Image (cartoon, rainbow, N blue to C red):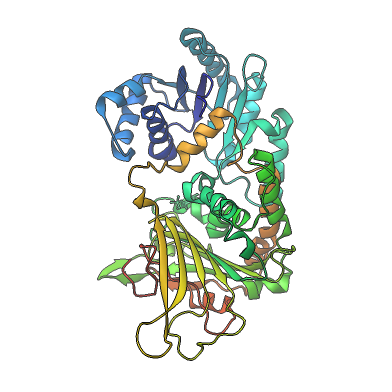
Amino acid sequence: MNRAENQILVIFGASGDLTKRKLIPALYSLEIQDLLPEKFAIIGVSRKDLSDNLFREELKDGLNSFSGKPDQNKINGFLQKIYYQSVDAQNAATFIDLKNRLEALQFSLDIPANTIYYLSTPPSLYGIIPDNLARHGLNDQTGGWKRVIIEKPFGYDLQSAIELNNSLQRDWLESQIYRIDHYLGKETVQNVLVTRFTNGIFEPLWNRNYVHHVEITSAESLGVEKRGGYYEGSGALRDMIQNHLLQVVGLIAMEPPASLNSDAIRNETVKVLQSIRPYATEDIMRSTIRGQYVASTIKGEKIKGYREEEGVNPDSKTETFAALKFYIDNWRWGGVPFYIRTGKKLPTRVTEAVIHFKRTPHYLFANKSNGEAHNQLVIRIQPDEGILLKFGMKTPGAGFDVQTVNMDFHYSDLSLTHIPEAYERLLLDCMTGDSTLYARADAVLAAWKFLDPVLQEWKNNPCFPVHGYPAGTWGPEKADDLIEEVNMTWRYPCKNLSDDGIYCEL
Ligand code: BG6
């Protein structure tokens, strides 16, 4: 892999949690793998008044807590590449200080004007900061390229996403804008492409002729923790489905791209999102479920309900669980239901996609089977990353009893391979100018377009239920009704890829 050109990375929102927990540890990991540009600097930006040294001290604590391999000598060396500049993002005049600081560092460190601006700030600043950068010519690519990374959520609904997009595109080219979705940076999400397109055995079956339905789950055992204020205005649909889960749908359902270049791949994933059948208002009641965790007791410990969390309205209708059934209207997937669900305070943390294959046309062993009569391919995104194929096998002994057995691959078996954190991969890609794993404007807008009617209906229809589910359970029972087929339910994944079932060890 070619080393990225020399450059400076500016992080807005430098005193925030994301910077400390994810961005700086990811950059440190790149440093120890010798993947950062030869000449490289980071400028942390926020409103606070801080010296470079105080900022470094703050980051050092974060590095010791959140980086996999803290090594004090290496950390100290890495911190020397980090600087701090106070800027009030809302006050255009203060951007001159950033401009001066950038120019001074470029000169003293002999770095060309290649610059990334990472917006790890509240979403209300996603329009203002690029605007203020442009006012000071900080988007000008004459002496070196300029790129801007925008964290999620990109917009609050379709209209606000369009407005944000228009505002960005006034001063920045689409090729300069990197909309980050950290799920695309996960190794196992990228592996969907490899699994599908290097193995001759899966692709011929990957369509409506053989696939019965597709199920995608992203469960979290944590609640909203200290983010009640943010989450109240977001909810599971905006927080997880609009971005992370629909991007995974894009990769699972896309056509093979003509090449591995960024546009070829993104052209195919966007077509999937644009082909999702829009909901008519009357479908929304049938095909979508929202839920909210309520207080419960887990292993003797009392767990708060969502409405008791800090920063949450006691009458809140914000969903902490969402499940959807939808169809992708194209030749490959016509008539195949897709089920996706996500929730907080579920029994375990797990994200996976399951391809459920159709039964054989004539099932000889119908009355003997104690296992599922259809094959499943489980693509485990986290944890216990890997792939599992479930198939029927004869139980040894008399007769023809069939049991379902597992064939599994676990990434942990590749003991010498480092699985990079999503942010490592994504930061490195932006440094080298590769936007394949970033969401393009048309994809983000297509996702909003699909979900906007759901958001409207959930907000405006007072009869639309918010189903309570006890914290620590698999969400509202009502979600089971989405899967209409007899004898079929959601998969109940466990921490270990190879186990499932409501009562397995979590
Ligand atoms: C974030 C959401 O984008 O993704 C969080 O805002 C969520 O609410 C998180 O917890 C999940 O990410 P991961 O990588 O832990 O699955």
Residue closest to the eye, 377 or 163: 377
Residue shown at 33%/42% (left/top)? 416
Taking the image as shown, residue 276 lies to the left or right of residue 483, namely right
Q: Position of residue 428 (x, y in %)?
A: 50, 32
Looking at the image, residue 220 lies above or below residue 156: below
As drawn, 156 above or below 34 = below
Q: What residue is at 40 percent from the left and 20 percent from the top?
A: 81
Horizontal placement of 136 versus 431: left or right?
Answer: right
Left or right of residue 373: residue 271: right
**Rendering coords of residue 493 (x, y %):** 42, 67
Residue 234 appears in the rendering: no
- Left or right: residue 493 versus residue 113 is left
Q: Which of the two residues, 305 or 500, is positioned nearer the viewer here?
A: 500
Q: Which one is nearer the viewer's eye here, 96 or 449?
A: 449
Q: Residue at x 39, y 68 (%)?
A: 471
Q: Position of residue 32 (x, y in %)?
A: 36, 28
Look at the image and tell me in which quarter the C terminus lies: bottom left
Q: Nearer the viewer, residue 143 or 412?
A: 412
Residue 130 pos. (x, y %) = 63, 30
> Where 354 falls versus 429 (above or below)?
below
